Amino acid sequence: MKDHLRIVDHPLVQHKLTLMRKKDTPTAVFRQLLREISMLLAYEITRELPTKLRKIDTPLTEMEAPSLSGKKLALVSILRAGNGLLDGVLELVPVARVGFVGLYRDEATLQPVEYYFKVPTDLADRLVITLDPMLATGNSSVAAISRLKEAGASNIRFMCLLAAPEGVERMRSAHPDVPIVTASLDDKLNDVGFILPGLGDAGDRMFGTK
């Protein structure tokens, strides 16, 4: 994947995102839309997975058919909101290994604080897709990816629902080797670090804790 930032402008993605942005969208509907949109984003972020040919028997004949090659990819959810994307991607790639990075944002400093880290083995040999619905300041995402690199990951991609220009630039500066796939590049951050126009706090809306 060559582009540092790839915006998935498919009509279904954009329509579902519009429904998610609406403030009166119920929690259950928001959660279902996030699951659906994550599957569509996953098609884009996995577009260049390596394949190899292997012999199979169809009902009519033998053939050489493409299959995924190499170690199973790793999905790493940045807790807690990343789990909303995780479910949809796992529907598409159920054999993927799964890891978690627990971070919360200090509301005073906007800096990430880590409280949990558990990831699959052999990250150096796997494509690692990091999941978080919102790329706002970029601080949590940068911290999570730094920890993954410390654990051996070298082929990393980042998937989010919304991105702010400030977060994209922060990621580009800290991790220029990590492509970003998103449904939208929004306008800016407000003075407390939320994306505008955005959709509010994705975790709160997903889990009904707003």
Image (cartoon, rainbow, N blue to C red):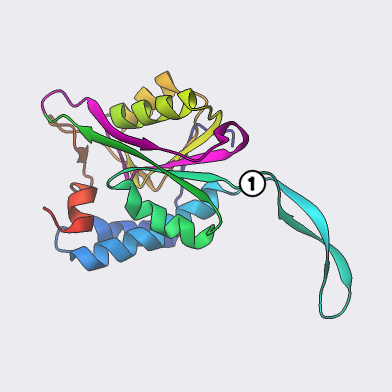
Tell me: residue 121, above or below residue 83. above
- Specify the segment rendered in magenta: 108-136
Q: Position of residue 25 (x, y in %)?
A: 19, 64
Q: Residue furthest right?
A: 61
In-front residue for pair 39/99: 99
What residue is rendered at 41% in x and 20% in y?
174
Residue 118 belongs to magenta span: yes
Q: Position of residue 63 (x, y in %)?
A: 87, 66
Per the image, label 1 sits on a secondary structure element best described as: loop
Q: Position of residue 132 (x, y in %)?
A: 35, 43
In-front residue for pair 148/38: 148
Taking 157 as reference, is 169 left or right? left
Residue 80 belongs to magenta span: no
Tell me: residue 31, above or below residue 86. below
Taking 181 as reference, is 70 left or right? right
In-front residue for pair 149/201: 149
Q: Is residue 201 visible?
A: yes
What residue is rendered at 35% in x and 26% in y?
143
Q: Quadrant of residue 60?
A: bottom right
Taking 9 as reference, is 192 left or right? left
What residue is rendered at 50% in x and 37% in y?
157
Q: Position of residue 119 (x, y in %)?
A: 45, 39
The residue that disc 1 covers is: 49
Q: Residue furthest bottom?
A: 59
Taking 136 as reference, is 210 left or right? left
Tell me: residue 121, above or below residue 17. above
What residue is rendered at 38% in x and 52% in y?
85
